[in-house]
Image (cartoon, rainbow, N blue to C red):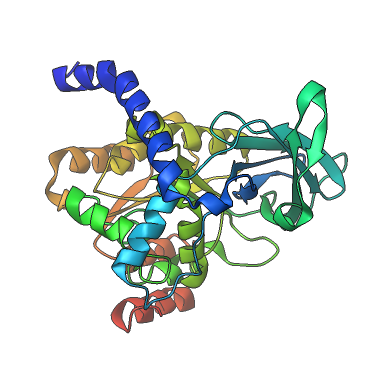
Amino acid sequence: MNPVKTAFKLALPAVERAVLAADRAISGYVQPRRARGKLILQPYVGWGTPHSVELTGRVLLPRTMSPPAKADRRLRNFANSLRRLFSREVAGVRVNGVLDGISVSAVSDKDGYFTLLFAPSAPLPSGWHEAALSIERLGSEGKTDHVRKSHSSQTRARVQVINEARFGVISDLDDTVIQSDVTSLPRMLITALMGNARTRTPFPGVGALYRALIREGESRNPVFYVSSSPWNFFDLLWQFLDYRRIPLGPIFLRSWGGGLLAEHGGHKHGVIDRLFERFPHLSFVLIGDSGEQDAMIYSEVVRKYAGRVLAVYIRDLTGAFRDETVLKLRVELARAGVDLVLAADSLNAAGHAMAMGLITPSEYRGVLISVTGPTER
């Protein structure tokens, strides 16, 4: 094993403790004192089958952030980024959820996370649903005190139920959908911390390509986003996708702390395995970029789930077409009947998708106009 990687793994527990300690120390000063004692719910996106749905989220103290605007100054965006990163999580709070008449509950853990598991007695129809969430403080001797209505009971969460679909899409976010400069740490930090959901920029043609692949409607093809960003940035990413008209779907992020310092590949492998196993009837299109390990990760997925990957699209940020490792992976996948397409832009991927019958010629023209014309919005 690489000595550097070995040393990193040995030091990881100490680094994690230091990060979490700094988080607790700094968050007390970043978050406004007047917000202390109040609770809010941050639900993520629920997902599952007609017979089993899970919805995760977090219990937090409020963060004073106004809606994002293009005119927001970098300093303001940076302050909001700090409020996200150094959020105040609340443990021991009971979260109640109701989905299609089914009531379940869970208690937030030490990092504020909760997971609600719904098992409908009758199959849920495919598509988007809405869950209603409320919270209770756990009092002494097992008693509960309802949190004031103005701070809790009207929280809504979106839930996607997947049943009938032609295929699914699993996509990275950073430097695949949203321009993040992950190949340069200084530029990446400036971009991530000093931007907002209105100022962050998608790659040209991404929205048109994903809309073509997803095909909104009753038999909508689901899209799942997997990113190495921390859960603290969920709201920014969701608002970005919605604002840029990029199809919405469940987002899988990582915990701020040791989980964020762990290898990117392990996180992505774990999520992809869950998706392939939860939806055994679906084949998938895998989309990523050459800035991290996506080509290698997706190649391993092709080997593990033979016959279930339709295509692999890798946005070429680093001249990967000259990388011998990537070229060998492309040859290897071709032998398995899967094309690994290295694309400088969304148009190359769209051309391949049209040739495979995944999108129509008119949808391809939509991507062409989006790439060659003005950037979307």
Marker count (numbered): 0
Q: Classify residue 127 as left or right of residue 302.
A: right
Query: Split into 4 quadrants, where in the image is the N terminus?
Result: top left
The answer to whether residue 220 is above or below residue 131 is below
Q: Classify residue 121 as left or right of residue 258.
A: right
Residue at the image point whose x is 61% and y is 67% from the top: 216
The answer to whether residue 176 is above or below residue 205 is above
**302 vs 209, nearest the viewer:** 209
**339 vs 163, nearest the viewer:** 163
Residue at the image point whose x is 32% and y is 84% from the top: 373
Q: Classify residue 194 as left or right of residue 255.
A: left
Residue at the image point whose x is 54% and y is 45% from the top: 283
Q: Position of residue 98 (x, y in %)?
A: 81, 47
Q: Position of residue 134 (x, y in %)?
A: 76, 47
Q: Position of residue 285 (x, y in %)?
A: 46, 50
Residue at the image point whose x is 64% and y is 36% from the top: 114
Residue 359 visible in this rendered orientation of the protein: no
